[in-house]
Amino acid sequence: MKDSSKGRFLRRYTELPFLIDFLESKNITLLNPKYWDDRNDSYYLQQYGVATGLSSIYSLCLTETNETYHHWRVFSHGASGVCIEFHKGMFLDRVRQVEGLRAEPVIYRTLDDMRSKPPETEELPFIKRHAFGDEMEYRLFVARTNHETITLKIPVGLDTISRIMLSPWLPKEVANQVKSALRAIRGCSKIKIYRSTLVENEAWKRFAKNEI
């Protein structure tokens, strides 16, 4: 399948415990979207399950866009936030080996769009309101019948990781310890790990004094 992606990377904003779980298990976890903050989004996925008779729904949200303040604040707020950046082509090759998994960009539509062309059932898992368009979401989605667990684990090798970014609100001194702890995990010694400088960047600040 040829990928019509916008960029070379996919980014997953999450929290440090979920990152550790991923690095230790080499599995990425899809969750039931029932309790997502965007109730419209959650409702569409649940309705897909109703329409198809597939009662077990699992999803994971990533983004195709570069680092943004919005993503840090909404999806990984606080000092424990992290961003896992994946090599997009390699990552998609791995996850698409899972039976029934769909990995597609989200389509953002307005109410007027929906009135003029209501969505087909197969489109429901990948439609979101236009106001969320800046998120540039890329979604993994699986629907199954009577799966016994509340999560779905998918094997994804650590070689798919481009780099890991730690929260811009994590103190620098603590960030160094976190980097050491993460690199001590088996297979992680060579992973690139950075603390984001989004909210405090020394190179940016120098321009205020006309420095180069």
Image (spheres, grey):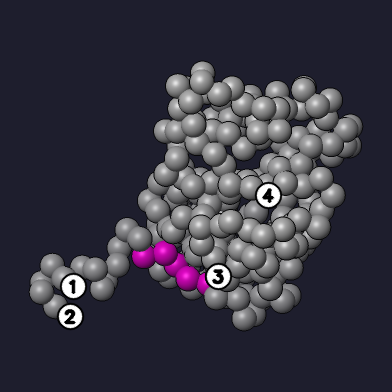
Q: Label 1: how many residues lie within 10 Å, few (<14), some (14-19) or many (20+)?
A: few
Where residue 79 sits: x, y (%)?
A: 46, 54
Q: Main secondary structure of the magenta part?
A: strand
Q: CA distance from mark 4 to mark 3?
A: 21 Å
Q: Is residue 21 above or below residue 201?
A: above
Q: Which residue does the numbered mark 1 point to in the structure image? A: 206
> Which is more toward the observer, 116 or 45?
116
**Rendered residue at 70%/23% (across/down):** 47
Mark closer to the chain start, 3 or 2: 3
Where residue 12 sits: x, y (%)?
A: 57, 54
Mark closer to the chain start, 1 or 3: 3
Mark closer to the chain start, 1 or 4: 4
Q: What residue span does the magenta drawing correspond to?
A: 193-197
Query: Quick one: SS at disc 4?
Result: strand
Please tell me whether mark 1 or mark 4 is closer to you in this view: 4
Q: Which residue does the numbered mark 4 point to in the structure image? A: 103
Where residue 157 sits: x, y (%)?
A: 74, 68
Where residue 10 sits: x, y (%)?
A: 56, 59
User: Tag 4: residue type?
Assistant: Ala
Label drawn at residue 163: 3
Residue 24 in sight: no
Please tell me whether mark 4 or mark 3 is closer to you in this view: 4
Q: Is residue 133 above or below residue 121?
A: below
Q: CA distance from mark 1 to mark 3?
A: 26 Å
Q: Is residue 121 left or right of residue 15?
A: right
The question of residue 115 being in magenta is answered with: no
Please tell me whether mark 1 or mark 2 is closer to you in this view: 2
Q: Label 4: how many residues lie within 10 Å, few (<14), some (14-19) or many (20+)?
A: many
